[in-house]
């Protein structure tokens, strides 16, 4: 519980930066921190997040509590920076490792120069279709709930902006990137679109959020810092 001593937790509300572990939902993180704050203040405390991370993903979450929860929506509109690993030659029903994976043969693996050219082509404003397994609401219901029921889900495309897209490493079939994107950008969709532009299938194998505007991952705390082990 050393993290409690480090944080200037204010009774009226504030922000907590968390490094979310893989395998946990964003709502799971919120529930655990809510319990911590309840024990600390001796009463129930309202806690919210400012943008979900998929269960497989790790990295920065900005949690708000108390009166600060009223500012949650404005914080969701901030730019974000991610590092991601993209697997070429395979597709996933969910766009990530948790879906049904299908492999495809690639006769001629793309050269690094081709990969760099494709990445460069995405910089700027682009039109993107979010994944069907997403938290977007369709007719009042979350898209992922409809998809899990086997219902047909049609999600309208949207304009997003890719401010930068850097190739960190390329060892076929793996591409590691770092990207700075506008709010509302889905890295899973970006991974699939990169694969399509390289004439193959692809999915996002790993994803880590490093920044949300001026909030940095290095300033965050891990759940175990709060004594949370599961």
Image (cartoon, rainbow, N blue to C red):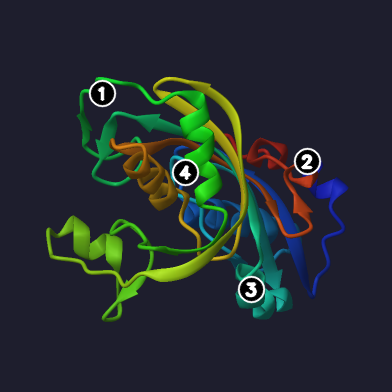
- Rendered location of residue 163, percent (x, y): 64, 56
86 versus 137 height, above or below: above
Name the one closer to the observer, 5 or 221: 221
Which of the labelled discs sits on residue 106, or is there none?
A: 1
Task: Say which label, 4 or 3, has the lower sequence index.
Answer: 4
Q: Which residue is mark 4?
A: 24
Residue under the image location 29 percent in, 29 percent down: 89
Task: Say which label, 2 or 3, has the lower sequence index.
Answer: 3
Q: Residues within 10 Å of mark 4 (few under 14, many from 20)?
A: some
The residues tagged by marks 1 and 3 sit, at their Cα atoms, a distance apart of 44 Å
The answer to whether residue 56 is visible is yes
The quarter in which the N terminus is drawn is: top right
Task: Say which label, 1 or 2, has the lower sequence index.
Answer: 1
Q: Which residue is mark 2?
A: 218
Q: Does dot 3 land on a helix, a strand or a loop?
A: helix
Q: Which residue is mark 3?
A: 72
Of the residues tagged 1 and 2, which is closer to the observer? 1
- Rendered location of residue 97, percent (x, y): 35, 35
Q: Does dot 2 land on a helix, a strand or a loop?
A: helix
- Rendered location of residue 49, percent (x, y): 59, 63
Q: Are marks 4 and 1 in contact (CB under 8 Å)?
A: no
Q: Are marks 1 and 3 in contact (CB under 8 Å)?
A: no
């Amino acid at each position: 519980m050393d993290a409690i001593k480090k944080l200037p937790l204010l009774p009226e509300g504030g922000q907590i930066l968390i490094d979310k572990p893989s395998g946990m939902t964003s709502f799971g993180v919120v529930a655990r921190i809510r319990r911590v704050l309840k024990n600390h203040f001796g009463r129930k405390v309202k806690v919210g997040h400012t943008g979900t991370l998929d269960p497989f993903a790790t990295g920065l979450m900005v949690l708000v509590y108390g009166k600060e929860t009223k500012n949650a929506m404005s914080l969701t509109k901030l730019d974000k920076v991610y590092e991601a690993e993209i697997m070429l030659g395979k597709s996933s029903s969910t766009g990530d490792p948790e879906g049904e994976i299908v492999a495809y043969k690639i006769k001629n693996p793309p050269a690094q120069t081709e990969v760099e050219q494709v990445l460069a082509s995405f910089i700027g404003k682009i039109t993107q279709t979010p994944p069907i397994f997403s938290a977007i609401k369709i007719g009042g219901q979350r898209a992922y709930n409809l998809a899990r029921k086997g219902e047909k889900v049609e999600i309208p495309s949207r304009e997003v902006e890719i401010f930068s897209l850097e190739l960190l490493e390329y060892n076929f079939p793996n591409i590691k990137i770092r990207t700075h994107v506008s709010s509302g950008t889905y890295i899973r969709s970006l991974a699939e679109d990169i694969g399509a532009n390289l004439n193959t299938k692809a999915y996002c194998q790993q994803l880590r959020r490093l920044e949300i505007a001026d909030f940095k991952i290095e300033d965050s705390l891990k759940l175990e810092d709060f004594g949370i082990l599961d």
